[in-house]
Image (spheres, rainbow, N blue to C red):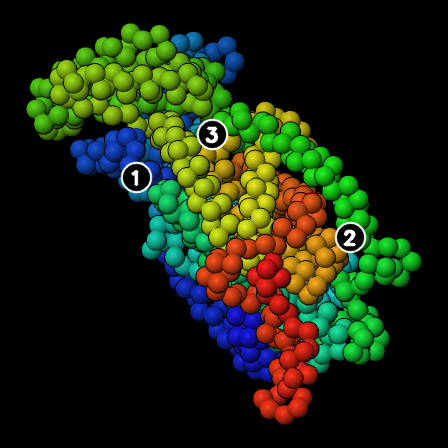
Amino acid sequence: MATFLHGVGSFAFRRRWLVVLLWTLVLGAVGVGAASSSGSPSTAITLPGTEAQRAMDLLAEKFPAANADGATARVVVRAPDGEQIGAAEHRAALEATLTDVKESSDRVGQVTDPFAARAVSADGSTAYAQVTYTAADTELTDRDHSGLERALESGRDRGLTVEASGNALAPPAVSHTAEVVGFALAAVILVITFGSLVAAGLPLLTAVVGVGVTMAAITALSGPLDLNSNTPALATMLGIAVGIDYALFIVSRYRSERADGHDAQEATARANGTAGSAVVFAGLTVVIALAGLTVVNLPILTSMGLAAAGAVIVAVLVATTLVPALLGFAGERVRGKARKRPAAGPTGQDRSPQDRTPNDRTPQGRTPLSQRWISHVLRKPARTLVLAVLALGVIALPATKLDLGLPDDGSKSASSTQRKAYDMLAQSFGPGVNGPLTVTVDDRDPAVARDGAAELGKTLAARPDVAAVTPAAFNEAGDTAILTVVPRSAPDSDATEELVDEIRGLADTMESDTGARALVTGTTALNIDISAKFSAAILPYLALVVSLAVLLLILVFRSVLVPVKAALGFLLSVLASLGALVAVFQWGWLKDLFALEQTGPVMSLMPILMVGIVFGLAMDYQVFLVTRMREAYVHGADARAAVVSGFRHSATVVTVAALIMISVFAGFVGSDDSMIKSLGFGLAVAVVFDAFVVRMTIVPAALALLGDRAWSLPRWLDRALPEVDIEGEKLTRPTPPPTGPSAGAAQREPSRANVGDASH
C-alpha cells in the first residue's frame, strides 16, 4: 500500500493541475446534480419487522382514502383566560380561523370540527382540530407552509391563542453556525500548531472540497433514495472532522520529511506513502463500522451510516490525491518559519517538534509537554492505569440508567409553536393526548372483526390507565377497524410503555379466543418498538465491532495483547461517553451550560451511532500513536523506550487531530435540534475520553507494564497473516545492488524488521 500511495503522491505532485481539474469537475458534476434534484429529504421513520410498522402497512392497505402518507397538522386554540372557547364570539373566531386553515392551500384535504369530534377540553377553554393534507410533507411548498402560518396568525389577531404541531409545518431553517464554529476553532488550532497560514489553510480547504462533494451528492440522491432529513447532519459532522484530520496527518508528515532533507516531491510522495497509508487504514475502519449499521435493518440508520461512510471515503480520496497536489502549489510556504533554516543533512539537525529526542527543549528552553506527560505516565504506570480506568468507570456509571426514546414536540424549544401546542394539549386534555395509540382490529370475516373491535374497545375503556377510547371506525369492506386509545400518561413515560405491552397482551388473548387480530401503532408505539429494537441490536453490533477491531489491529501491529487492550479501551470510551450523555441529557446535570431546555430519554439511535463512529475514531488514534511505538521496538529499542519514542513522535499530531475533532463536534452542541445537539455532545466527549485518557494515558501505561509481551505473536499466526506495510517500511528499506562486493555490506544495513521476527 505504501509503495502504491508513494506513486500516487508523486504523480499528484507532478500533475497537480490535472488533479485539481479532476476534483473541480467532480465537484461541479455533483453540484449540478444537487441543483437539478427535485426531491426532498423524508422525515418519516419506518421500522421493518415490528408490530407498529405492520399495523401502519395494514392501514395503508385497508384505508387507502385516508392517505397515510399525507402531511398532518394539529391546530390548538385557546380562549382568553377564564373564558370559554364555545362562547359565541370565540366560537365564531375559531370557525373563521379553521376556514382560513382550510383555504391556506389547495392541498388541504380535511379540517375537523372540534365540537363535532369532541375535541374540546373539560373546562371548555381549549379545543383542537386535526388537519390532513393530500400530499406528503416532503411535497409541501413554501407557499403551503406560509399559508398555514398566515392562517394561524389570523386566529391570534382575533384574540385567540393559536399554536400548531405536525409535519405540515415548515421545517426549521438550516443553520450552518455549527460548521462555521467548528471550522473557526480548527483554523486557530492549525495556525498555532503549524505557525503557517498556508499549512493551516490547506487541511481546511481540502475538507471544504470533500464536504462539498458529499453534501451535493446527498442532496442529489435525497429524492431518488428517499433519504431521511437527518442524513446530512452526521455526514457533515464526520466529513469536516476526518477531512481536516486526514489532511493534517499528511501535511505534518510532509513537513517532517522536508526537515529530514528530502526535496518537495519526494517529501510529498513519502508523506503520502506513510501517513497516507495510515489514513487509508483509519478511514477503512470508520467506513466498515458505519456501513455495519445496516445490520440493524432500520432505514434511517442505514441511510445515515452509508452517507457518513461515503463522506469518509471522499475524505480519504481527497487527502491522498488533492493534498499532495496542493502541496506542489504551496511549496516552501507550507513549512512556515522552518523554511528559513537550512534543510537537515544526514544527521537531521533541522527537526520538527515531533522528531526531537527526549532531551530536546522547546525554543524557550522547556521540555515539550508531550515529553513531560509521558514521563509522568511511566513514572508509576500501574497507578496511572488504575486511576484512569477508575475515572472512566465512574463517569460510565450513569449509563446503567440509560433510557432510550425518540424526540417529540415536548423536546423542542420552548419558543416553538410545536412545543407550545404540546404544552397546551397536556394542560387541557392530559399528557396522553400528545401520544395517542392507534389500535387496528382485522379479520377476513367482517362479523368477527366487528365483535373483536367491540370487545377490545370495551375492555380498554375500563382500564384505569386509559383516558379515552374512540368508537371503532371500519373500512368499506368492514373487515378492519381503527380504535384510538388515549393514555393518561405522557408519551415517553414508563406507564405508557406498560400500557402498550398490556394492549398487545390483550390482543394475543383476543386472537386466541375469537381469531381476530389486533395491532398497536402510532408514533408512541413506533418509538417504543424502535427503542426495543435498538436495545436488542446494540450488544450484537458492539460484539461485531470489537471483534473487527481486534482482527484488524492484529493484522497491523502483529500482536495479540495490543489489539485486545485497544478494544477494551474503546469499550471504556463508549461507556463513559454514554454515561456523560445520560447525566446531561437525561438527568439534566449542567444542562444550563449546554443550553438544554428539556431533558428526557436519550435518542434511540445514539448508542449504536456512537459505537460505530467512536470505534472508527479510536482506531485512528490507535494507528497513528502505536505504529510509531512498534516501529521503535522492532528497530531495537526496549519496550519502555519504544513507548517513549513513539509517543514523542506522535503525541503532538494526535493531540491536534483530537482537538480539531472535539471543536467540530462541539460546534453542533449549539444546534436547536435535540438529536444533533446530543450527537455532537456525545461524540465530543467520546473523543476527549478516547484520545486523551485511553490512547495517551492508558495505552502507554499498559504497554510499559506488559513490556516485551505486548509485541508477541504466535509463530503460526505470524506466518498466516499477510504483511500490511502501513508504516511505509518498503520506502525506507535500503535496496542492495544485485551483484558485486557491496551486496554483502548492503545486506548488513539496518532494515525495518517485522514485529514477528522481533517477538521470536
Judging by the rendered image, the residue that carries numbered circle 3 is 404
* Residue 150 x %, y %: 45, 36
Judging by the rendered image, the residue that carries numbered circle 2 is 370
* Residue 536 x %, y %: 39, 33
The answer, for residue 316, to whether it is visible in the render is no
What quarter of the picture does the C terminus occupy?
A: bottom right
The image shows residue 528, relative to residue 649, as above or below, that is above
Mark 2 or mark 3: which is in front?
A: 2
Q: At 59% from the left edge and 27% from the top edge, which residue is drawn?
A: 397
Q: Which of marks 1 and 3 is nearer the N terminus?
A: 1
Q: What residue type is labelled 3?
A: Leu
Q: Report helix, strand or loop for mark 2.
A: helix
* Residue 655 x %, y %: 70, 52
- Side of 590 relative to 167 (left or right): right
Q: Nearer the viewer, residue 468 or 160?
A: 468
Q: Which residue lies furthest to the right in this view?
A: 365
Q: At 50% from the left edge and 75% from the top edge, which residue is drawn?
A: 22
Q: Earlier in the sequence, mark 2 or mark 3?
A: 2
Q: Which amino acid does label 1 sit on?
A: Pro
Judging by the rendered image, the residue that carries numbered circle 1 is 48
Q: Which of marks 1 and 2 is nearer the N terminus?
A: 1
The answer, for residue 122, to whether it is visible in the render is yes
Crowding near the residue tagged with mark 3, few <14, some 14–19, many ≥20 C-alpha atoms within 10 Å: many
Q: Which amino acid does label 2 sit on?
A: Ser
Q: Report helix, strand or loop for mark 3.
A: strand
What label sits on residue 362 in the rendered view? none
